[in-house]
Every structure is written in C-alpha cells, then in structure tokens.
Amino acid sequence: DALARLEGGDNDPSFSIDEVEEESCPTPDDKTGARGPEEAYGAAKWGVPRKVWGTVRVPSYTTSPGPGFGLSRVFAGGVPIYSGEVEVRFVVSLPCAVLEQGAKGILQFGHGLLAHRGESLQGYVVEVAENSRMAVLALDWTGMSR
C-alpha cells in the first residue's frame, strides 16, 4: 500500500527544513580535539559540521498517532490499512569527509530506547560516518523516543 502510494506520484512525502547548523571543517594542521599528534587530523575531523533538522510527513498505519497504539484495521492476509499521515522529526548529518569528497552512501541510524534522533550526532556514529564517507539520517521512532 505505502509503496503504491509513492509510485502513484501524487503522494510524495512532504518535508520541511527547520534549521541548518553549519560549522567549518578542521584543516590537517588543526590539532583541536586531537588525542595525540598521530591522530590529530582524523580525531579533529570527527565532528558534524552540517546538521539539517526537519520534519517529514509519512504514511501511518496505526489506530492513532503516537506511542502505544496498535495497527489499524487489517485486511485479510494481515495487511494494515492506511490511516492518514503523521509528521516525523529527523536530522541529516554530514561529516567533513562527505562535505569535502562527497557521500558514498546513507547510513540510516536507529536510536536506542527513550533516546532520540540527536543520538546520531555522537560518538561512534560520527566516527563511522566520517571514516566511511556516509551521510547519516536519523528519525525519532514512535514509541521509542522521549
């Protein structure tokens, strides 16, 4: 059902950009944030100089928006019924390697229980994105985010 809606062309997901955060990428001589001289360049680059915060409207198949609700009425065969659209918050993060050399792909990040999309901007996720030249997309998961 959802794929058919998108393929029809009349129901493209609409989105809005709420905020874009921009910082500059460190240069190879920048030692800020380095753990040692041999790691200065890579460690200093493990930041996210561009963050795009927004919302996207997506199909909903639950009885009501928000956590704790079940799937809408179900067709024979177990297929849930479309019940409208909901807005979902997202962040797209672009590490320095992506801004400087282009993205090799997109890493879709799923946050932990009671966390949120901002968890994708920390620690190992940033390091993996930088080292693999991946843009990162993170959404707030209904029922799992705070």
Image (spheres, rainbow, N blue to C red):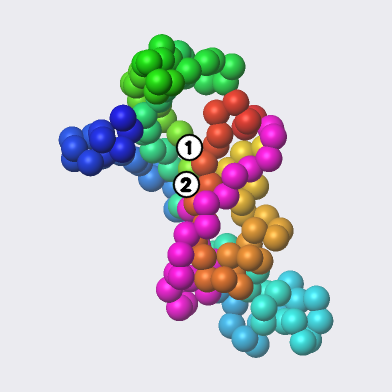
Q: Residue at x 35, y 41 (%)?
A: 16
**51 or 66: which is nearer to us?**
66
- Give neighbour class at mark 1: few <14, some 14-19, many 20+ (Cα, 10 Å): some
Q: Earlier in the sequence, mark 2 or mark 1?
A: 2
Q: Residue at x 23, y 41 (%)?
A: 7
Q: Position of residue 30 (x, y in %)?
A: 66, 82
Residue assigned mark 1 = 89
| Residue 55 visible in the displayed image | yes
Amino acid type shown at disc 2? Trp
Residue assigned mark 2 = 53
- What range of the chain is rendered magenta? 91-114
Give how far apart the Cα atoms at labels 2 and 1 are.
8 Å
Q: List the single residue furthest toward the right.
A: 36
Q: List the single residue furthest toward the front.
A: 77
Q: Residue at x 65, y 87 (%)?
A: 29
- Give neighbour class at mark 2: few <14, some 14-19, many 20+ (Cα, 10 Å): some
| Marks 2 and 1 close (CB-CB < 8 Å) | yes
Q: Position of residue 1 (x, y in %)?
A: 31, 30
Amino acid type shown at disc 1? Arg
